[in-house]
Amino acid sequence: MSSSGFGGGGFNRNNNPFGGSGFGGNFPNPFKNQGGGRRRISPLTITFVVLFILASVLVSLSGFYADLLWFRSVDFVNVWQTTLFTKAYLFIGFGLVTAAFITANIYIAFRRRPMYVPVAVEADNLERYRAQLEPVRKFVGIGIFLVLFYFAGSSATRLWQEWLLFRNATEFGVVDPQFGKDVSFFAFKLPMWQSLIGWGISTIVLAILASAAVHYIYGGIRTQVKEDRTTVTARVQLSILLGLLVLLKSVAYWFDRYALTLKEGRLITGLTYSDVNALLPAKSILAAIAAVCSLLFFANIIRKSWLLPTAGVALMVIASVLIAGVYPAAIQQFQVKPSESTKEAPFIQKNIDATRLAYGIDDVEVIDYQATVSTSAGQLANDAATIANIRLMDPNVLSATFRQLQQIKPYYSFADSLDIDRYVINGKERDMVVSVRELNIEGNPSRNWINDHLVYTHGFGMVGAYGNAVDADGKPSFTVGDIPPTKGLGEFEPRVYFGENVPDYSIIGGPATSDPVELDYPDDKSANGQKNYTYTGKGGVPMGSIFSRLLFAIKYQEQRIVLSNLINSESKILFDRNPRVRVAKVAPWLTLDGDPYPTIVDGKILWIIDGYTTSAGYPNSRKVNLANTADALAVRSNAVSTLANQDVNYIRNSVKATVDAYDGTVTLYQWDEADPVLATWSKAFPNSVKPKSEISPDLLSHIRYPEDMFKVQRDILSAYHVKTADAFYGGQDFWRVPLDPSSFGSNSGNQPPYYLTMQIPGQKKPTFSLYTPFVPRGGRENLTALAVVNSDARDDYGKITVLQLPRSTNIAGPSQVSSNFEAKPDVATSLSLLRQGGADVVLGNLLTLPVGNGLLYVQPVYVRATGNTAAYPLLQKVLVSFGDQIGFSETLQGALDQVFGGSAGTTVTNNQSDTPTKDGTGSSQAIKSAIASLQSAYADLEAAQKRLDGAAEDKARARVKAAIAALISAQNR
């Protein structure tokens, strides 16, 4: 017998099954044709194969190298390197160990195959398989190794985040009450240990199957023989592997004990009474039994009987069913259920404490708010600051209005949902509805490759309107807009190369000539009707060399990148330009807020994106899926949620990220300085996150509390505002977020939280806040609480205050107030008239304000023409409700006065933006605007009278009245 290595020795078709080696013997060589010579492959076939392989490699490398260039351009190469090297280490390490372990066992099984195989029908059948395998045995062995290496390595790369957390774990400083371990063990280490155990079990199982198959094929396992069905080698090898498998299962049982703190249960997340008193001991017992069973398998190396190991496995299976299944169920049924509230109380309390701490709601202040429903004259006298900041401009309605009034050209666009920010105007902080005028190449009537990627490269300008002011026609009162932009918010770089609506890529820099290629903005004074521009920022990837041009030509499959004479040594390419995409690439460990918002900071347009650090490993904390926090806005936009489909039970807004709209610079700032998850990632990616102290004062003034974070917290707060186990178990005081009254049918969803400057009880002055109402869980729609979080980046930033209403007081909730509006006869009649004559009524956000010792509801009413693609919503009416009183007027002041006995006690104007400036031009501009609005409204009134259109006449007459009121107000300043 010749038997050297995995490739040595084999079976032939003679009586001696172990003769011959390699491709010798009587076996036919599959690589030879019938004529005895090798089958020749044509040169053309070889050429095509080589070209195909080269093309595939080039396409893969183009994306890989382009990624490296992109990270260099944003100065985050360390992130690219750390991620790549971590994945590479895991790929090689896991792949090599897995493949080596399994193929080594295959080699051992083959090398130690029996010299002689008893004569049997089964052996004759297997001879055919051995004969077919023999000529390609070496290639099969190499193939198995490579396949195992690739798939095991590829699977291991998915563990790169778990591995970095494991290596860089930072303690929370909070100890789990059951095991006495720091939370970092459950959040950072347990997931990796479980992954390693799962990998080990899978590898050993594959090794057992592969070894058993080889032993069977080569006679080491003989199922038709009555005695000695396994050879000594087969018995020893399989005993060792099975012993290792059962031993690893023992370790798995031990770690399962810790995983019980994260178990989702019917009542709570985490350990329950039956878990601690039955399942936890059961896991320890099973771990001990499995360890003993592994010893029985190891003992089988010496013994020649599978009886004891088989009996041990049977005992482990029976124990698993009885101890870990039947016994805990019996404890639950006969001990816990009869007195569940008392048995589970300590564990419910642990769940409450852990959940409130994990979601950052442990320091929520709950204030009993004795809200009144009665009204009287002058009731709002002490709430003048809040009333003055009531936002009538709904950012989710006005996108069409912004487009029609400020789009300028069809190749510009605005987001479907605008943003809320605040700016200091004439020494006073004002809420603003803002958006960026972004590029929309879909609107360009002349589409071609040069226009799409070299000419139309950027948007232009920022547009902002006062949140609480309109002109006489109901249009937003813009403080910054137009092209070139007005200077209501100061000087700033208006060009937007990086935004939410940008082309896949743009090539900028252009030829080194005096004639710029890029369209900057339309300009009637220029000969060709436009201003051109050449990008001068530091953003983008240089692509002047022929190699770079070829690289991106392959990446985007566009030969004109190489051939175009408009691209030269000064050119750069911009790609991955969406702010969220850029932040996600430089910080792949962050969960990002779904709503980046633009702001003007230090003379630049910056996108601000909130980054969250999350974990699913906080013991005993309630687990939620972030995608389930969707509200009515997400439903209307056909998005499940702005957050990822991710289960978490810990979240912090630990990072504030910015992206420069002009040069694409990405900056990450530390925000939560006490977050151990951020500290862990900062160890893994050093110098990626700048300290909080480097945030400029101007940027700090525009930071706000993130909306998505608040959605998660309010969902948790709806149940976990309850602090005692008894009340939690009863569930009578649970809340829910009300449905948005402005959405109906298939578009219905939870009311979104709203930004608003308000002063709640206990505050000394108004603050920019984010709030949400609550109604009782269980069907009723009356208001039960109002949660308000301070969104100003000051000392009380992030403080959540809950105004809890008396349970005995029936305060109408948002849905009830909306129904009351429609049920009031004069309101219903007016709304019906507005909906006639080719017009449609759009109801804005229903705001809830704690003023006048009660709750004030304010809802703007917009009118939009139907059947006209250029139509846009205009504010025409304002609805107000307090208690049982409802006001409905063209102005907020008029509606408030109707509710509060003819005088609300505070003065409000819908034209506050025209406050006189230092040069005294404010009132004259207001007069001119009011006169223009009056003339337009009067002309529409005459036209409606001529065509006998009653509905249009009523609307025009209302506009005339509003214009006259605005003119009188402007003249009195």
Image (cartoon, grey):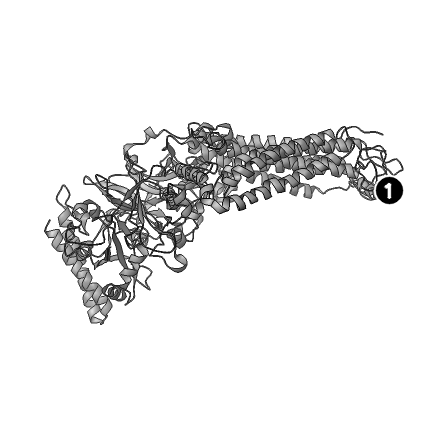
Which type of secondary structure does the marked residue at label 1 adopt?
Answer: loop
Res. 113 image quadrant: top right
Can you tell which quarter of the image residue 933 is in? Answer: bottom left
Judge left or right: residue 449 versus residue 842.
Answer: right
Looking at the picture, how far across and down is residue 327, in whole percent?
58, 42
Expressed as whole percent of the image width and height from the top left, the position of residue 208 reads 70, 36
Find residue 489 and report its image quarter: top left
Q: Is residue 900 shown left or right of residue 40?
A: left
How many tags in the picture?
1
Q: Nearer the viewer, residue 63 or 573?
A: 63
> Viewer-proximal residue, 901 or 685?
901
Residue 430: x and y, percent?
Answer: 23, 43
Q: Position of residue 605 (x, y in %)?
A: 32, 39
Question: Within 10 angstroms of label 1, few (less than 14), some, or many (20 or more) residues?
Answer: few
**What residue is shown with label 1?**
120
| Residue plotted at (34% across, 37% down) | 363
Task: Indicate whether 344 appears above or below 73.
Answer: below
Specify the amino acid type for callout 1. Answer: Ala
Vertical arrangement, residue 100 with respect to residue 786, above or below: above
Q: Residue furthest left?
A: 972
Q: Can residue 542 be seen in this view?
A: no
> Looking at the image, which is closer to me, 535 or 465?
465
Q: Can residue 951 be seen in this view?
A: yes
Looking at this rendering, what residue extends furthest in the right direction? 15
Q: Is residue 200 above or below residue 887?
A: above
Location of the N terminus by quadrant is top right
